[in-house]
Amino acid sequence: DVKVTQSSRYLVKRTGEKVFLECVQDMDHENMFWYRQDPGLGLRLIYFSYDVKMKEKGDIPEGYSVSREKKERFSLILESASTNQTSMYLCASSLSSGGTDTQYFGPGTRLTVL
Amino acid sequence: GQNIDQPTEMTATEGAIVQINCTYQTSGFNGLFWYQQHAGEAPTFLSYNVLDGLEEKGRFSSFLSRSKGYSYLLLKELQMKDSASYLCAVRDSYYNQGGKLIFGQGTELSVKP
């Protein structure tokens, strides 16, 4: 079974803090994704990566950056957390970019910025 | 632009059949996915359609019409545990690298006894 893990289930930070969210997958997947999920807005893609050290902006990259130094690990960084970044953050990975290869999701990190 | 529409909420009775619709407008198309997400949990994969027609998997079936930009998820013999949010997602071939998906807002299904 594919396993995608995220470093924290719940996180509380203060405005202006630098926040790191870590995601690790154990199935040698090429692609990794970071989403945020908010009521009424669904899943929105922040950044994704299709190879080590490669990153692409998603639909809402502002205020975020990412790092992929190793294939299995994809980190989301909030440079200076703000209250509007309070959300559920979901990491996902997929084997390839086509066919039936679906995305597998981690359990999510609920981030609250005070 | 890219747009995926699905109803916000639906209610159905245990043992009944429910159909959740999804319409999409995307610049390209390379597959449509349905996911199930229970409250507080991660989405999990349910089905995949890339060709027109019906795909059946136990109590769940998914249909696709590419010419109409339309899909539905059919849930039969509803059980209380089927209460969840159902997400429709399209892989837009224009963004093929990385296999990016575009998600709808999700349909919250409540199954009543």
Image (cartoon, coloured by chain):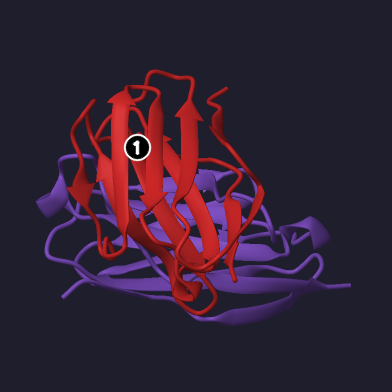
Q: Residue at x 56, y 27 (%)?
A: A3
Give B54 or A50, whichever is nearer the viewer.
Answer: A50
- Residue B63 position, x and y percent, is 41, 58
The image quadrant of residue B2 is bottom left
Residue B29 in view in this figure: yes
Q: Colour of chain B?
A: purple
Identity, as a three-letter code, of the amino acid under mark 1: Met
The image quadrant of residue A7 is top right
Q: Residue at x 55, y 41 (%)?
A: A106
The numbered mark 1 sits on a residue in which chain?
A
- Residue B31 position, x and y percent, is 28, 49
- Residue A70 position, x and y percent, is 33, 21
Q: Is residue A108 left or right of residue A100?
A: right
Q: Residue at x 39, y 61 (%)?
A: A80
Give B53 or A30, whichever is nearer the viewer.
Answer: A30
Residue A102 in view in this figure: no
- Residue B103 position, x and y percent, is 38, 63
Residue matched to label 1: A32
Which residue, as the protein is rendered here, is positioned at the far front? A16
Image quadrant in which the C terminus of chain A is located: bottom right
Image quadrant in which the N terminus of chain A is located: top right
Q: Give me the chain that's red.
A: A
Q: Is residue A113 left or right of residue B1?
A: right
Q: Is residue A72 left or right of residue B51?
A: right
